[in-house]
Image (cartoon, rainbow, N blue to C red):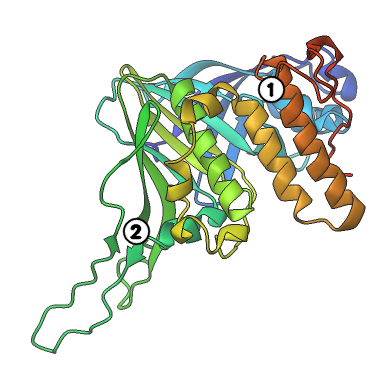
Amino acid sequence: MIKKRTLFKLRINISDLDQHLATADPCTGLYDAELITDEKNLVMKIFYPGKEYLGSKIQRWAHNREDKLLSYFEVTEVIEPSYLTAIDFMDYSYKGMTVGSFVESNHFTIKLTGVRRKFSGITDETTEFYLNKQGFSLVEMNYRYPLRMPWTTEPFKWEPTNEVTDYVKFDKIEFKPEHNFFNSNNESESEISIQKEPKIIVKHEDLSEVDIKRHVSLLCSLFSFYAHENIDYVTSKIQTKEDYFYEARDTEENSNDGHGLFRWDFSQNPLNLIVNVNAPHLLANLEFVQNIITRYNYALQLDGESKFMILYNILEQIRNQYILDGKIDLDKNGQPSKPKKVIQEYKFNKSK
C-alpha cells in the first residue's frame, strides 16, 4: 500500500520568490510533485517549467530561512493513490536540496525530515510504532533464540521466542514490544540475512491518532529514562476507526547497552518501570515529564557544577509544578505557597 507512487499537486505560498531570480519567468505557484521513500531517505520531487528556475529561486530564498521552508508548502490535491486523502509536512524541516543545471533541469528534490500521510477506506491494519536503534536492546532483552542445529535429516527451523506474550496495559492502550524480522537480501541469493527492527504494537478502543501518539510518546520517554538514551519512534502506522495514518520521521540514531543506571533495578527490564508508574497523571503532564527526562538524561553526561545545576533545577521544576497544581500548600517556612511567585529560574538550551 505505502510503496505505490505518491503523486500530488503542490502550491508554494512564497509571494516574493520571483525577486530571487528576476531574469527568470514568473513562478506559477502550483506544481506537480512526487513523494519518494526508501529505507533511508524521504524525498519530495517537484516538477516545474525549466524557464522558471524554481529550484534556484527556492535555494536562494531558503538560504537564511531553512527551518521555515516547508510551512509554505501546501498539498492541494492528491492524484495517486486514490485512497490517500492528505499529505502533511507538519513542523518538519528538510536536510538537503538538489537542483539540476540551469539548462537541463525541470525538477528539483528536497530531502525531508518527516511527513505524515492519511488514508481512507483502510480498516484492518495494525497500529505499530517502529523505534530507533536505541530501542533495539530494550526489545532484544525479551527474546530467546534456538541454539541447537538440527540433524541433516531434520528441516531447519529458526523460531525466535518473545517472552512478552501478553499485551501490557498502559492507561487507555495495550502494547507489546517485539521485533519485526525481515530478509534484507535479494531473494535470488543462496544465503539470506535476517534483520530485525524494534517496534511497539498497540491495541486500543476507538482512540484518536493524537491520543495514541501521546501514549506512545510517554512510553518512549519512560524507555529513555530507563536507558538514559533518546528512544523515539521513526515510523508510526496508526489505524483509527475511520482512517489510517502513516508518519515517517528522522530521529537520533545511536547504539547502547539499554540499561543506563538501572542495570540492576526493575529486574533489568523497563516494563517493570512502566507498569508501576501513574500513567494517567504522567499523560496529563506529558510535556512537563518529557522536559524533565530530557534534562535528567543530559545532566548525566556532564560533570561537576554543570551536572549539579541541572539536577538541582530539575528538583526546582518539580517543586514549582506541584505548587502550581496545588499539591504543595505550604512553603518551607510553613507559610501558604504563592503560585504567582513561582518562576522558571533557568532556561535550558541543550546546544550550549
Q: Earlier in the sequence, mark 1 or mark 2?
A: 2
Looking at the rendering, which quadrant does residue 275 occupy?
top left
Residue beneath the point at 28% across and 80% down: 147
Image vertical order of residue 277 relative to residue 210, above or below: below
Q: Secondary structure at mark 1?
A: helix
Q: Amino acid at mark 1?
A: Tyr
Identify which residue is drawn at 64% across, 53% down. Answer: 228
Q: Position of residue 62 (x, y in %)?
A: 82, 30
Seen in the picture, residue 278 relative to 156 is either above or below; the reply is above
Look at the picture and state if 88 lies above or below 193: above
Residue 55 seen from this side = yes
Q: Residues within 10 Å of mark 1 (few under 14, many from 20)?
A: some
Work out whether residue 333 or residue 285 is closer to the camera in this orientation and state it: 333
Q: Position of residue 249 (x, y in %)?
A: 57, 39
The kind of residue on which mark 2 rests is Phe
Q: Which mark is residue 181?
A: 2
Q: Which dot marks residue 322?
A: 1
Q: For the residues carrying marks 1 and 2, which lies nearer the camera in this image?
A: 1
Which image quarter is the N terminus in?
A: top left
Q: Is residue 335 left or right of residue 12?
A: right
Which residue sits at x=64%, y=34%?
Answer: 290
Extreme residue toward the bottom, this view: 152
In the rendered image, residue 299, in percent from the top left (x then y), is placed at 78, 49
Extreme residue toward the left, this view: 153
Expressed as whole percent of the image width and height from the top left, the position of residue 254 reads 63, 58
138 relative to 333 in the view: left or right: left
Secondary structure of residue under mark 2: strand
